[in-house]
Structure formats: structure tokens, C-alpha cells
């Protein structure tokens, strides 16, 4: 009952936030944009039929079809817009939850209830995930239905992206909670968590940069060191690849028609081929190892935050 009460409170707090409705509107705009794209035999239409192109006619979109659109949904709408821009907004919206709870008066009421501090912390932490779960479920379900009914592409694995969004948020949110508990400052929590997220991304991308450029990979000692370090922080960069893998979307370079890729010079094509191979390798990465190691890092940070919360004098 205690957990359910805190969960309901987290749901109400989520709905009351203006950022919640900003993301809802953004989701509806993306869904409307997707609805405006249609197929009719060999024809592909945009803006509800105002602009049409045939898939076998010369032009930049002649080989751009349904699978490329699924890749665009995963890599642009899901990963870039909701997975990056949306998560930043969610971090901003939730950064003040623990600092506000620890204010005089609010914390006194909560601690007067028959619940341990550790359990209160965990319940509040989990309830914060309601915000991103609601946003993720709304976006993924609506776009899944559009791809199915409008484009004729049904990808059941795409629905698992709701879980991925919650995991991605939790990897960053643990840092926000830790700093929020230590400093009681929402601003500090926002700045540190977003900075940590950027650092996680750089560390994760470093081995891929070495593999894309052979000259860097020849530095074996440095390359091996970078690979080892890349396994320490959360694998936030794996979000794109896991989502694409479960949705059957292919790699990000599939978004571009092959005719556009062929226009590059020989050196450019060689580099793109290496980048393609790196992406294909990332798609085959073991999701259990990626998610498991990321959750282990998150667990350490959450335990540190919980320890500070439990030991603090109120």
C-alpha cells in the first residue's frame, strides 16, 4: 500500500508538470508527420498526398521505402528526439523531486509515517520512472500503430523500446538523484547529470572511433585501454542499436538511399563502409551484457545516494 500510494503520487506529479504536456504535444506532432507519409503501390506520398514520388523513378528518394522509414523512426524520432532531447527535458522535470522532498516540513511528514528511510528512498526513486514510462509508452505505441496501419510494417519488437527508454533515463537519473541528495540543489543535479551523460556518451563512442579509423586502432595499448574503460559507465550509446535491433530497423546509414551514398568519392565510400561495419557489429552486441553492466553502475550510484539520504540529519 505504501508503494502504491507513492506510485500514485509520482503519477500525479508527472501529469502536473508542464514538460509532460510539452512532450505529449511533441509526440503528437511526430505522429502527425508520420501519418502524412503514405504508400500507394510504387508511389510514395508526403504531406498527405501533396507531394508524390515513384519508388522506381530517378531522384533522391527513388529507393527510399518502408524499411528506411522504420530506420528513420528509430534513429531520428525515437533515439534523437525522444531519446536525447526528451530525456534532457525529463531530467529537468524530475531533478527537483528529491531536493523538494528533503525540505523542512515535507520530509518531516514523510518520516513520521511507518516506513524506513531506505524503503522511502527506493519507492520515490521507482515512482520517478513513471514520468518517462508514460511518455515512452505513448510515443512507442502510437508510432507502432502508425507504422502498422499506415505503412503496413508491423514490428512487435519495437514495443520493447518503452523498456529501453526507461533504462536510458534511469542511467542518467541516478546521477541526478545522487547529486540532488548530496546538495539539495535541483540546478546542481541537472548540470551534473547532463554532464555525466555527455561523458558516458564520449567514453562509449571512443572504441568505435578507433575501429572506424585504422590508424588509431594500430595503437594497440591505447585501444585496449579505451575498450576497458568504456565498460565502466552506463552504455547509453547502446540505446540506438538495441532499439534498432529489436525493431528490425537495420543501421542508421540505411536512412539514406543507396543512390545518395554512391555519389561519395572512393575515400568517402571506404570510410562509410568501415562505419557501416562498426554499426553492424554494435547491432550484434549482447544486450544482457550491455544492460547488466549499466545497471551494475546505476546500482552503485543509487546505493551511494541512498546511504547519504539515510545518514543525513533532518
Image: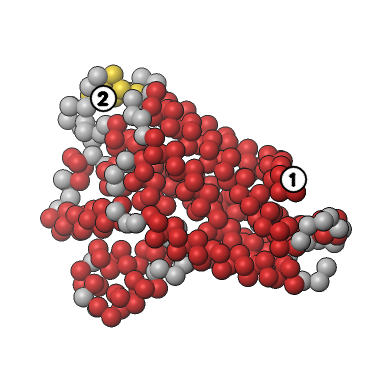
- How far across and down, in percent of the image, does residue 63 sit? 21, 33
Identify the residue at image location x=67%, y=57%.
122
User: Which color scheme did the rendering employ for the protein?
Assistant: secondary structure
Q: Is residue 243 left or right of residue 1?
A: left
- How far across and down, in percent of the image, does residue 245 sit? 34, 46
Q: Circle 1 sits on which residue?
A: 1
Q: Nearer the viewer, residue 106 or 34?
A: 106
Give the vertical position of 282 relative to 133 (above or below).
below
Task: Find numbered disc 2 in the image and state the secondary structure of the residue it sits on.
Answer: strand
> Do callouts 2 and 1 mark residues in contact (Cβ within 8 Å)?
no
Specify the farthest residue to the bottom.
Answer: 221
Identify the residue at image location x=33%, y=29%.
153
Task: Find numbered disc 1 in the image and state the secondary structure of the residue it sits on.
Answer: loop
Identify the residue at image location x=20%, y=46%.
261
Identify the residue at image location x=38%, y=50%.
242
Is residue 136 visible in the rendered image? The answer is yes
Between the residue at mark 2 and the residue at mark 1, the CA separation in whole angstroms equals 57 Å
Q: Circle 2 sits on which residue?
A: 53
Q: On the rendered image, what quadrant is the C terminus found in?
A: bottom right
Give the vertical position of 221 relative to 202 (above or below).
below
Q: Which mark is residue 314?
A: none
Is residue 50 visible in the rendered image? The answer is no
- How far across and down, in percent of the image, does residue 308 sit? 70, 71
Give the vertical position of 218 relative to 206 (above or below).
below
Q: On the rendered image, what quadrant is the N terminus found in?
A: top right
Amino acid at each position: 500500500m505504501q508503494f502504491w500510494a507513492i506510485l500514485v503520487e509520482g503519477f500525479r506529479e508527472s501529469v502536473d508538470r508542464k514538460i509532460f504536456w510539452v512532450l505529449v504535444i511533441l509526440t503528437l506532432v511526430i505522429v502527425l508527420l508520420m501519418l502524412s507519409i503514405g504508400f500507394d503501390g510504387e508511389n510514395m506520398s508526403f504531406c498527405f498526398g501533396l507531394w508524390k514520388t515513384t519508388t522506381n523513378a530517378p531522384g533522391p528518394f527513388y529507393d527510399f521505402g518502408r524499411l528506411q522509414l522504420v530506420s528513420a523512426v528509430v534513429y531520428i524520432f525515437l533515439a534523437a528526439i525522444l531519446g536525447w532531447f526528451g530525456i534532457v527535458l525529463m531530467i529537468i522535470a524530475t531533478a527537483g523531486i528529491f531536493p523538494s522532498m528533503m525540505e523542512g516540513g515535507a520530509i518531516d511528514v514523510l518520516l513520521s509515517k511507518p516506513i524506513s528511510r531506505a524503503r522511502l528512498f527506493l519507492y520515490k526513486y521507482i515512482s520517478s520512472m513513471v514520468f518517462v514510462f508514460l511518455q515512452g509508452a505513448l510515443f512507442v505505441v502510437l508510432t507502432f500503430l502508425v507504422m502498422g496501419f499506415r505503412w503496413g510494417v508491423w514490428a512487435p519488437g519495437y514495443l520493447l523500446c518503452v523498456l529501453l527508454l526507461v533504462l536510458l533515463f534511469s542511467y542518467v537519473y541516478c546521477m541526478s538523484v545522487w547529486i540532488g541528495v548530496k546538495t539539495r540543489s535541483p540546478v546542481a543535479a541537472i548540470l551534473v547529470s547532463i554532464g555525466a551523460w555527455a561523458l558516458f556518451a564520449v567514453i562509449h563512442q571512443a572504441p568505435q572511433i578507433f575501429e572506424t579509423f585504422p590508424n588509431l586502432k594500430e595503437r594497440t595499448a591505447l585501444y585496449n585501454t579505451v575498450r576497458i574503460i568504456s565498460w565502466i559507465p552506463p552504455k547509453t550509446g547502446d540505446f540506438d542499436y538495441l532499439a534498432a535491433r529489436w525493431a528490425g530497423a537495420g543501421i542508421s546509414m540505411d536512412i539514406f538511399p543507396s543512390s545518395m551514398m554512391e555519389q561519395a568519392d572512393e575515400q568517402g565510400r571506404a570510410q562509410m563502409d568501415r562505419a557501416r561495419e562498426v554499426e553492424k557489429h554494435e547491432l550484434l552486441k549482447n544486450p544482457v551484457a550491455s544492460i547488466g553492466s549499466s545497471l551494475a553502475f546505476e546500482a552503485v550510484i543509487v546505493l551511494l545516494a541512498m546511504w547519504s539520504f539515510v545518514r543525513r540529519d533532518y
